[in-house]
Image (spheres, rainbow, N blue to C red):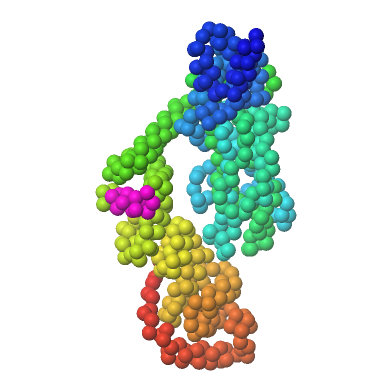
Amino acid sequence: MIIDNFIDQISQFLATIDVCNLLLVCSAWMQVLDVPHVWKYQLSQRDSSRLAFPSAVPMSHLTSSQLRVLLKCMRTLSAPEMSYNVIDQGVYQSSSDDFSQGLDKTLDNRKSTFWSSTGSENQNSSDLLVYRLINGLCIIKRISITPFRAFYQRGMRCYSPMEARVVIRISENDESSTTFSSPWCQITNRDEPFEFPLGEVTVFGEWLRVELRGRWSKQSSDNLYYVCLRNVSAFGVPIAVAPDNMVVQVLYDYISGKGFSSLSFLEFCRKTHYNMEKVTNMIDRGRERVKVIATCDRLIQESNVMLLIPEASQLRDTNEIRDHVVNALNEHGGTEDVMQYLAVMYHFLDVKFTEEESYFLATALIKVDEMIFFHDLVSKFRITFSERLGDIFLTSEKYYEAMVCYCGAVIPDKILSTCALLCSQPDNLTTLDVLIRACDDKPVVVAEMAAILQRKHHPYICCLFIMKAVEQLYIDLAAASDILGVRFASKQDLDELVNSQNLLFTSSATSSLETINFSISF
């Protein structure tokens, strides 16, 4: 008896595979370990290879053999390929600013689309988004939201909530059917995914509620607070894909017993198994993706770049695989391995470099000051533009290349700033004028551009810019006086300042610098 108790207690510190191995040692150990409470304990523990069974679901009525089946199912559902966005559709939004900014925009996985609340004078306003999960009932592994950053607005404000939490329910409007509720989490005002802590429990349900509280940012045009989300994701797996119906049966017994569903078991199975072909295809693609990534990782360890290219490019979601490869190469062998890989890709595949590949390529080209090759890639449409790509050129004072990237990524705020940095000669101010003409808040933009011109170029450039801004009626003389720090009684006073600075400019060494010619297409 003492030995039996000792073995029983030891089993609590063992992984499931070790418990299974002990069962094979002898029939006496099997008699001690192959009992319901041992398997229940194993089911309640979550590790890297297995999800824990939902703690809310009672298992006291299950036999050892049934518990072993559940354990096997939970291990299968934990596999990496058994995870994709299980949100089926958005069903409710507490508010929406515009038809084109509805709840469905959080599911299209595009950087330029988003859901927006209506504006409010109250910074502590609350919002609610409700989503239905695919195939009736899902096990959820992680949930994230991504706030939206308005690249098209001056200042590129991010419209994040101050706090957020997620709630999972079996029934949409029945609060008692809640299977999980996260704590309220502080959200920083940045356009980066925020993943909610799900803890060690296994979350399951049919409805996802995203509750938002507080708003960080005001929109300058109407001085109202808004919250905007670019993406909402819930990664998991429908219970119907479990290799045995035992999971479905146990969860159905729990749900129907609580009164959360009036469906018969047959109707419940039909609901959870709806459109299984689509689900199966997604899982098959996930398995293939895991297999390809494993092969790529092996080839990286072997430094076999020639075989790596076709392997990384064979799937439909090839960009994701290629981004993984280029980051793995950088960790394995540094810049040299990455550049060898990109060189082979350039010569053997007529494809556009991904955002990650474009960034690594630009980093290497900046180090050797090889901008001609970069311009050639741009002309052949083989570069994927991004703000991050423009920033690395800007930091390296490659202003023309930064401008090209910001234009390609359509980031007006940084297009203007970079244009001002390029205006070392009077002729270049024409392009800056064209850009400002398209802005709504012209006085603010003129003041910001003047600050850059004053900091980076000869005083004549800034004075000439201000004179043109006054002539175009972007600002008045009072604003010009404030910007330049000189009192102008009339337009003639401003003209005289410009003429005097022109004399200094033409006689200075800066006049011998080669003019930078550039153009922008809109």
Among the 4 quarters of the image, the one containing residue 29: top right
Q: Can residue 485 be seen in this view?
A: yes
Q: Foreground residue, 203 or 291?
A: 291
Q: Residue furthest left?
A: 348
Question: Residue at 59% across / 17% down in the picture?
Answer: 39
Q: Which residue lies furthest to the front in this view?
A: 2
Horizontal and vertical percent position of residue 460: 49, 85
Horizontal and vertical percent position of residue 15: 54, 24
- Of the 4 image quadrants, the one containing the N terminus is top right
Does residue 338 show up magenta in the picture?
Answer: yes
Horizontal and vertical percent position of residue 409: 45, 58
Q: What stretch is highlighted in magenta?
A: 333-346
Question: Residue at 50% across / 92% down in the picture?
Answer: 500
Among the 4 quarters of the image, the one containing residue 200: top right
Question: Residue at 40% across / 59% down in the picture?
Answer: 363
Q: Foreground residue, 173 or 72?
A: 72
- Of the 4 image quadrants, the one containing the C terminus is bottom left
Q: Is residue 333 left or right of residue 40?
A: left
Question: Residue at 51% across / 9% down in the picture?
Answer: 26
Q: Foreground residue, 208 or 189?
A: 189
Q: In this view, does 459 lie to the left or right of 362?
A: right
Horizontal and vertical percent position of residue 366: 38, 63
Q: Can residue 250 be seen in this view?
A: no
Among the 4 quarters of the image, the one containing residue 33: top right
> Above or below — where is 193 with respect to 373?
above
Does residue 166 show up magenta in the picture?
Answer: no
Q: Please tell me whether the stretch drawn in magenta is mainly helix, strand or loop.
A: helix
